[in-house]
Amino acid sequence: MHFDALMLSRLQFAFTIAYHIIFPSFTIGLASFLAVLEGLWLVTRNEAFKVLYLFWIKIFAISFGMGVVSGVVISYEIGTNWSVYSAMASPVIGPLLAFEVLAAFFMEASFLGVMLFGWKKVGPRLHFAATVLVALGTLTSAFWIISANSWMQHPTGYVQLADGTLRATDWVLVIFSPTFPVRLIHMVLAAYLTTSLVVAAASAWRLLKEPDEEESSLALKMAIGMFAIVAPLQLLAGDTAGRQVLEFQPAKLAAIEGFWDTKAGQAFHIVAWPDRAIAANRWELSIPRLGSLITAHDANAQVTGLKAFAPQDRPPVALVFWAFRVMVGLGLAMIGLGLWGGWLCWRGHLAKARWFLGACVAMGPAGFVAVICGWIVAEVGRQPYVIYGVLRTADAVSPVTRGEVSASLLAFLGIYAVVFSVGALYILRLMDQGPLAGAAEPAGAAVRPPGYAFAAAPGEPEGRP
Amino acid sequence: MSLDLPLIWAAILAVAVLLYVMLDGFDLGIGILFPFAGSPSERDVMMSSVAPVWDGNETWLVLGGGGLFAAFPLAFAAIMPALYIPILIMLLALVLRGVAFEFRLNGRARGKRFWTGAFTVGSLAATIAQGLVLGGFIQGVTLRDRHFAGGVFDWLTPYTLLVAAGLVAGYALLGAAWLIWRTEDELHGRARRWAWVSLIAVAVLLAAVSLATLYVHPRVALRWGWENGHFDLGRLTPLLPIPLLGLAGLAVAALGLRRGAHGWPFAGAVLLFLSGYLGLAAGFFPNIVPYAMTFRQAANPDNALGLLLVGAAVLLPAIVGYSLWVYWIFRGKVGADEGYH
């Protein structure tokens, strides 16, 4: 690997965006979960929902803050490190990213203030409205960013002029490029899965310590309900997304499956060691014809291999191949966990099933790992292009020096390591204390600094009928 | 009907950046003033006074950057690499001070102390970096074939350091004036003293930056009618309202402080910032990359700007509306017992 400004910029962008995506993929689902909890509390007046709301909002506040600040970085990095890309892509996807700011970021940021600090300032219904708006904001943000990313994966609705610049010709085709709907569904389901696995893990952890904690039992059931339904749906969404990759990005598909030769009845490689240097898999464990069946839904279908593309047009293979297998493996494990949990819920002795609770704890981070692997498949699989078929990553980099990017990359590594460790520590500490620890807190007025959101929150809100 | 879309977008972005400077200015200012608080509980109040709104304030920075990318991509592509180091320092500093809002509440003794420090250091470093960005921008950016072609440290000069010092004083003034408005008792009294000190510093540094700009940048001086050692009144007169606005802001802030007013010092600080902003803009408009590219040369085609405008026409009034509503919800003095009634 040659560490020039290009490679360092790629590493920096990969690092900062992989770090960033951890937080939205959690907060998108958590915002919706909080809206559901608050809505259920308003309707049923079951205090357990309020306790859970006030517990998870603390975790939401920490993760959302980390997501916001790491997201601001990305919006400037496309200029500092990828100025050629910015200048070229903006006439087409500039409005999409601006709409994300205008339609989502402001709404999230403004109503987050009300959500966190407004419990005593506005009535319960208005507070619920603020929670719903924050949840809608996170989904709107996902809409526009996935729209822009989908266009980069398979650009449509534009022309390239003689001087090389791009012009949008059909905004509907730009915003709703063919792969967008499925990719949006895939991402939102991934976020819901990630969140429900975290909620399940935290609740299971509490139940292992306190088997009679009703709030944790309730939250665990809600989480199981979510991933038991969503994990199989995600398999369908992922399969549909894969069919589109086969159609629109055959080189990416070949890398995902480790196909080198174009042939009918491709084998499915369960594991393999793909090596670009020799344009083959060094070894592989395969099932005949299953590869064609999975990718094209026909065991005899001809599927294009990597050798059909010039070596400089092939994406990195091993990384994409393995990231895909980790993602799918975790997805299958999530389906299994959902079936297991569903069965235990039906039988009705969830809180005593220690093996299952342990499995839930172990699967807590699975969503994050799967999301990052999914992004590696999508983004590394698109290489060597940044805008597929239009602009190569190597041509997109800013006129910056190796020294500048080395310094900033090191600074990111250092500061993000501190921020991430501390944020994770605080979140895990809250999870360990459980939902009731916070509920008891306001009695001791000195524990929370003044003005903190829920310093007094578990008291009765004003305007209660 | 044909709209002058590039001009409209230049105006929208100019307002967004101005709003950013004023809004995040006061919460960054709180961070700059943090070490001078009398006690940890005063720091809690200082932070509480901005905690519900800082995130919305910072979003104007994302609109500034995202809007520049979406409306004037050639300027975005030229400026960002030119100011690579100060922009990345700003981003990292904003990360540190942004997470400090939540981390400080969750930390125990040692953690709380660390994030108190991080909030100060992050706020100060972000302000200095923004000053260097502003100074580097006014100094001008070297382009070749529309891309940045200058040196790695072009943004680091005595002039940009002077601008950075001015911005630190300015944000401290905004922060102090905000605290005068929104707090009471001892902290309120302390904020008055901070406001006096920073007001004097702003007056001195704003004058120094103005003179330095005329001295260092003959092009800008020419705009203001300064040539060969004397002023051309024909050019200077139309621009005179700008420094007069600054003097008015200074007077409003100083009189407000003398008379013990709660809101007027903040109003005066806002007028001062408006004057400084307009004064700098008068020096480089219509350039969007001083002094190499006008906003028209940098603009996206009309079909993109038009689509953007349709969205902004719906969303911007809504944003202004609910932002004002949020400020209204959290109006009034932030007491030490806030949140406990």
Image (cartoon, coloured by chain):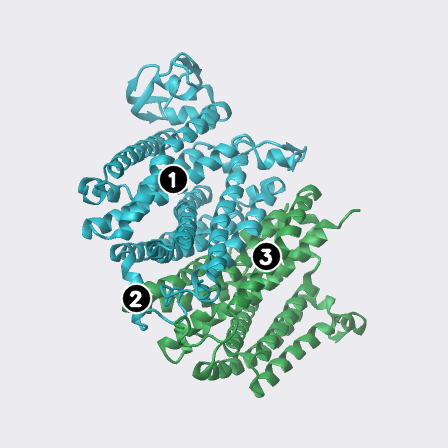
Chain colours: A cyan, B green
Residue type highlighted by circle 1: Val
Observer able to see residue B299: no
- Which quarter of the figure has residue A65? bottom left
Residue holding disc 2: A441
How far from the left and from the top, in percent, is residue A54? 36, 58
Say which residue appears at 46% left-offset and 68% top-offset: B124
What chain does badge 3 belong to?
Answer: B
- Amino acid type at mark 3: Ile
Q: Are marks 3 and 2 on the same chain?
A: no
Q: Measuring 60% from the left and 60% from the top, which residue is drawn there?
A: B321
According to the image, label 3 marks what residue?
Answer: B319
**Mark 1 or mark 2, which has the lower sequence index?**
1
Residue annotated with mark 1:
A371
Q: Provide residue B192's location: percent of width, then percent of height.
A: 51, 83
Q: Secondary structure at mark 1?
A: helix
Where does residue A93 sit, x and y in percent of width and height?
Answer: 59, 41
Residue occupying the point 26% across, 52% down: A214
Give the mark toward the camera: 3 or 1: 3
Residue density around tag 2, few if under 14, some if 14–19, many if 20 or more, within 10 Å: some
> Label 1 marks which chain's residue?
A
Taking the image as shown, residue B312 lies to the left or right of residue A401, namely: right
Q: Amino acid at mark 2?
A: Glu
